[in-house]
Amino acid sequence: MLRFVANRLLQAIPVMLIIITVSFFMLRLAPGGPFTAEKAVPPEILRNLEAHYGLDKPLPVQFITYLGKVVLHGDLGPSFKYSNRTVNEILADKLPVSLELGGLALVVALVLGLTFGILAALKRNTIFDYAFSTVGMVGICVPTFVMGPLLVLTFGIHFGWVNASGWYTWQDRVLPALTLGFVYSAYIMRLTRGGMLEVLTQDYIRTARAKGASETRIVLRHALRGGLLPVVSFLGPAIAGILTGSFVIETIFQIPGLGREFVNSAFNRDYTLVLGTVILYAGLLVLLNLVADVVQVWLNPKLKFE
């Protein structure tokens, strides 16, 4: 297992280098710059600003300098928009909000997805199965930027049950978590249903039923572990998708998280903040996929760490 983890981490190094390199040069070659504004900046001030942030040096030199600071010191540089703050400080300030939103959305996705998926498998080809499958299809087909405003209009404005925006009380968290979690609950429901249907037809399940085991024991003790394998393999990229999907949700619901800050930094051409966010999310994606692979092998001993 340790060799497997070490090999995956070594494979992640060139992946991260490629991501940093491509993102760096794409940002620098894009039109505009961090000091571009509606009112033109005097040339003398512009030269001083570029010299202060090292933007007056050749692009390869800028890249090597930036890469060295990131690799050797974990320094993501200063923010061009917030002159008195570093990217590390901004990420440390905004990331907990996005993680909280992602955690709540993941709970919603798992509770709804696993519950509906198991029930749909147990009630195969009944009205319950068709109803849950219909709900899942709606969750997959309706994007978050449509689902969010619909929930705001219905439950936030029309009924007034919860708040439509902000991040101060528990009522502020209900609609964003539901909007983000509902989409992934649909995928989890379909994967759980498929995995459970495959497991419930196995010989050892028939043997357990023949021995008089209760349906609850069969599901929880025997079928669930094998039925969840497709869900586990999906959870790695799903969790990363929940975190990165918060870009839209945080903008719709005015949540002061990292996703909203990333969108603003892209508009502001804040090179270092955009790059820092990309590096953070890419690292999370690599790490979560690794965790998902380890858990999948733990659930299914037939698989091997390779």
Image (spheres, rainbow, N blue to C red):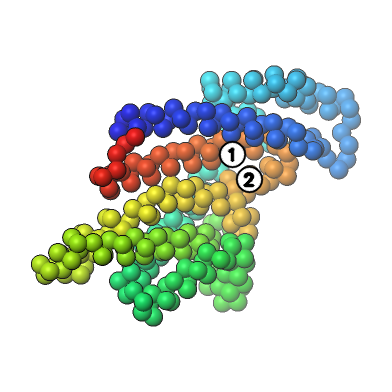
Note whether residue 263 is visible: yes
Residue that carries the numbered disc 1 in the rendered image: 277
Seen in the image, is 260 located left or right of residue 186? Answer: right
From the viewer's perspective, is the residue at label 2 or at label 1 nearer?
1
Residue that carries the numbered disc 2 in the rendered image: 261
Q: Quadrant of the C terminus?
A: top left
Task: Check whether the beta carbons of the residues at disc 2 and disc 1 lie within 8 A of each other.
Answer: yes
- The residue depicted at 62 percent of the width and 65 percent of the height is 146
- The residue depicted at 38 percent of the width and 68 percent of the height is 116
Observer-nearest residue: 187 or 208? 208
Seen in the image, is 142 located left or right of residue 199? Answer: right
Task: List x then y, in percent, for residue 143.
Answer: 59, 62
- State the image quarter where residue 224 is shown: bottom left
- Tell me the element at label 2: helix
Task: List x then y, in percent, for residue 182.
Answer: 49, 63
- Tell me the element at label 1: helix
Which kind of residue does numbered mark 1 sit on? Thr
Q: Is residue 163 above or below residue 27?
A: below
Which kind of residue does numbered mark 2 sit on? Glu
Observer-nearest residue: 263 or 41? 263
Observer-nearest residue: 68 or 89? 68
Mark carried by residue 145: none
